[in-house]
Amino acid sequence: MTSEGSGFAQPSIPKFDGHYDHWAMLMENFLRSKEYWDLVEMGISKRTEDKESGEKQKKVIDKELEEERKAIDGLKLKDLKVKNYLFQAIDMPIMETILDKDSSKSIWDSMKQKYQGTTKVKRAQLQELRREFELLQMLEGEKVDEYFAQTLTIANKMKIHGEKIGQVMIVEKILRTMTQRFNYVVCSIEESNDLDKMTIDEL
């Protein structure tokens, strides 16, 4: 049964959004599902190409050479398909920097070199923001709206760096770290509300 007639939705090509590690994982899975990942990982066999070239020089045509030539042609066709998938995943400004790459492997390696380092920097920054969020406490004399703003600023920075942080986590963080003079108010809020459904605005 063909994929067109199977009734299953075809997986969409993952768009590169600047988060290299996440995109690379999705794209690798997508290419594996198409049975194309080996081309990206290993490239087209140079050994086979070199052997074919040597045989041509000797002007020896045999069955083995013909099979290898067909295999190379088949791999090159598959590689064009993989390049097409990668081009569809990448926006024009990035694509312009990789148009000179002649294989899917060279495109992949170029993307990895350019963006994995950036991802590592973002990951380090996220770790620091997580630590800052974890250690954050309301100070004596600090106004409630000021503490809310400080907490939300850190949370929003975490989101920008790829952290999935929901409102429930922020609400619980604020309630847990307010100064002792708000203990009665915090207890009252916790007893009279479902914190799993409370928004920051409601708090």
Image: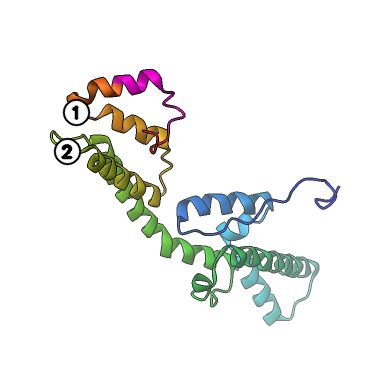
Residue holding disc 1: 179
Residue depicted at 74% across the width and 81% down the height: 59
Q: Quadrant of residue 50?
A: bottom right
For label 1, the SS is loop
* Residue 187 in picture, x, y percent from top left: 30, 19
Residues 199 and 34: in front is 199
* Residue 37 in picture, x, y percent from top left: 61, 55
Residue holding disc 2: 142
Residue 190 painted magenta: yes
| Range drawn in magenta | 187-198
Q: Amino acid at mark 1?
A: Thr
Q: Quadrant of residue 201?
A: top left
- Could you tell me if residue 130 is visible in this image? yes
Residue depicted at 75% across the width and 77% down the height: 60
For label 2, the SS is loop
Label 2–label 1 contact, CB within 8 A: yes
Q: Amino acid at mark 2?
A: Glu
What is the quadrant of the C terminus in the image?
top left
Residues 178 and 44: in front is 178
Disc 2/disc 1 C-alpha distance (Å): 9 Å
